[in-house]
Image: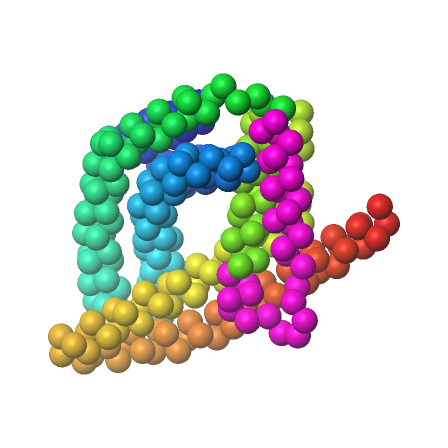
Amino acid sequence: MRLLEKAWKAFRQEAPGSIEEFAAALGQIDVAARAVRDRRLARHARKIGRRISKLEVLQTHRELLSRVRRLGLLPTEAATGLEARWEELSRDRTQRALRKTRGRPMRRLRRALRRRGNVGENNLGRRLEQAYKRHLRRLDPPGGEPGDGDLSRRRAALRIARGAALALAEMDPARPKPAERETRVGAALDRWHDLRSFRKTLSRERRRCERRGTVTLAFELDGLISALDRTLERARREAVRTARASSNVVSFNRRSA
């Protein structure tokens, strides 16, 4: 509850980094709620979390666009037009999210959290530990070459495992935070996921340009997408390699235990 209140206050003040902090707090609540099978609390956390997640994704795409502009992969005029459009979209989504968090959904979430406060921490800690181990097991690689769906499911499982680990660390400061290998795999999967999501957004923008008849911008975006495909493939190979290396370590540790 304390973590949520702090992150919520920072988000309302639009402080730097508050979107990620608020999203992480909501994610931890969702993980903890599912661990103790509190569907109502999990539903309230996810309802707000989806809105904040869209903001988080848009912010990542704006950062990637700035990097693309610095590298000269998109003409200045085209990059400026996209930046202006996405900045306006960001302002609109931020205002919607702020209204959401000041209204009924946030009140319901806080009320559900207060209700859940009478559950013993020992019980919660035990179930979080079970959730952490259960989702780590899902990182085991499937046979053959993993598809994009496999990588996405592995990333989702790792995010839940890390959320459980962080929630446990908040309950017990002496407990170690997620292991380095989990952080490393998470970073590789996140990079692949962010680039993949960025490419999808650029493809939508290209189709939008084609419908509006702005052929030049559509052509420039097509060139950027082609260049991005090579980077995306490298990020995918690195995510697969890192995830497999981590899974081998986990399997070895299990056999040695």
Question: Which residue is outermost to the top?
Answer: 118
Front one among 230 and 54 = 54
- For the stretch drawn in magenta, the main secondary structure is helix
Q: Quadrant of residue 5?
A: top left
The reply to whether residue 229 is in sight is: yes
Residue 126, image x and y in percent?
64, 31
Where 177 sits versus 234, above or below? above
Q: Quadrant of residue 201?
A: bottom left
Left or right for 163, reference 61: right
Whether residue 151 is in magenta: the answer is yes
Left or right for 179, reference 208: right
Where 186 sits versus 39, above or below? below
Front one among 105 and 22 = 105
Where 131 sits versus 108, above or below? below
Q: Residue at x 64, y 56 (%)?
A: 139
Q: Residue at x 66, y 44 (%)?
A: 133
Residues in magenta? 123-152
Whether residue 215 is in magenta: the answer is no
Front one among 217 and 150 = 150
Residue 122, image x and y in percent?
63, 24
Which quarter of the figure is the N terminus placed in?
Answer: top left
Residue 171, image x and y in percent?
58, 25
